Image: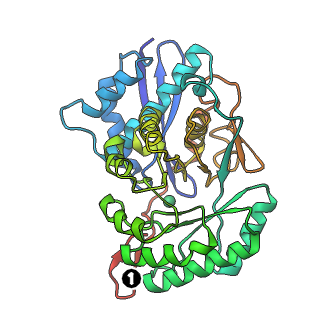
Amino acid sequence: MKITKITPYIIGDVRNFLFVEVETDEGITGIGEAGITWKEKSEAGYVEQLAYSLVGEDPMRIEHLWQLMLRVGFFPANRIGAAAISAIDIALWDIKGKALGVPVYELLGGRVRDKVVAYPHVVGDTPEELADDAKQKVAEGWRFARFNLPDDGDILDPRKAVRDGYDAIAAVREAVGDDVELIMDVHTRLDPTEAVTLCRDVEHLKPYFIEDPIRSEFPGALKRLRQLTGTPIAIGEQWATKWEFRETIEQDLTDFARIDLCIVGGITEARKVAGWCETHYIPIAPHNPLGPVSTAACLHLDMATSNFAVQECARPPGTVLPELFPEQVQLVDGHLYTNDAPGLGITFNRDAVSAYPPVEGECPRLSRPDGTFTNW
Ligand SMILES: [Mg+2]
């Protein structure tokens, strides 16, 4: 079997998604997704560049092609490159599963669990609204509630955000009780000192983890945070390749690894990072704010990975791009389920692409009260 064509599709919906289809001379196709939102044109360009190196190659040689994609042309792929590699890699696993007639999780060693617990995004502008939405999500069957560190529209005052963050966690805990796990995503918006205050203040409310309490460029800054609080933390959704995870894993700087399969380098690289995490007893909690391909890829890895904690599921299967992906994985009572279909177990309807023209625009912005740019 040989790769004949690789096509990136920028799909506009509530925002853009970047899907990549890999075609072969045997008629088997695979679908992948790249994960750096608001950079879809860059990712698509990188995919088109890689296509020159991949057409004519055997799609079954996934590891070989991964190494080629990372290092072809001498300069190792950057983060946009790793996202492009991710999309192609996921499509190659889809092709391999279809060619061998087995679901992808079988290629990863087989099932270690029967279902995958997932968490939704809980939304609201006030503690009361968050508490109400969390109760609604629990009534739908979810066992987790995840929400953002509060902001004030386009302003983030860190000291106020810490106080509002405490109030939000306290309100949701009061509303849903102790059996529902709580996650607050700080989204890299705080400096270490403010993150220490938040994590210490909420210890008695027992959040499952505080996500991305600080920026991710310098993992060493997590050392002081971890010395000063027992609140579990999770980081990693911005990182590409095993090398960006290395220091954090080896120095036990996180409690959970937020691997993004569509940024880190696909299923191939996520599996290696998960194995590295296993040596330090760090469970994975894969990042997934993306579309149906990311959800399916995460699910297959989670099904075959022992050190797994919980799966983010911001866009429940069936609720996003149903015409483009008429078959998606299943969500029942807050748990994701694979089917027995070969590959990822989803279908891509190329004919529906024209109904989703790309959306123009950029990511929302946040500023500190004095106008300083801060992470959104
Ligand atoms: Mg996050």
Question: On the image, which quarter does residue 337 sit in?
Answer: top right
> Is 286 located above or below residue 138 in the figure?
above
Horizontal arrangement in the rendering, residue 353 relative to residue 337 (left or right) = left
| Three-letter residue code for mark 1 | Arg
Q: Please indicate, yes or no, whether residue 164 appears anywhere in the rendered image.
A: yes
What is the number of callouts on the image? Answer: 1
Residue 26 percent location from the top left of the image: 51, 12
Horizontal arrangement in the rendering, residue 324 relative to residue 278 (left or right) = right
Residue 91 percent location from the top left of the image: 49, 30
Residue under circle 1?
368
> Is 150 located above or below residue 330 in the figure?
below
- Residue at left 44%, top 39%? 279
> Is 339 located above or below residue 100 in the figure?
below
Question: On the image, which quarter does residue 364 sit in?
Answer: bottom left
- Residue at left 71%, top 30%? 339
Q: Please indicate, yes or no, whether residue 152 appears anywhere in the rendered image.
A: no
- Residue at left 74%, top 62%? 179
Residue 54 percent location from the top left of the image: 34, 23
User: How was the colour assigned to the protein in this rendering?
Assistant: rainbow
- Residue at left 62%, top 19%? 102
Residue at the limit of the structure toward the right, as seen here: 139
Element at label 1 = loop
Residue at the limit of the structure toward the left, as seen here: 74
Horizontal arrangement in the rendering, residue 142 relative to residue 276 (left or right) = right
Residue 55 percent location from the top left of the image: 36, 21
- How many neighbours does mark 1 have within 10 angstroms: few (below 14), some (14-19), or many (20 or more)? some
For the C terminus, give its image quadrant: bottom left
For the N terminus, give its image quadrant: top left
Is ligand 1 less than 8 Å from the beta carbon at label 1?
Answer: no
Question: On the image, which quarter does residue 254 sit in?
Answer: bottom left
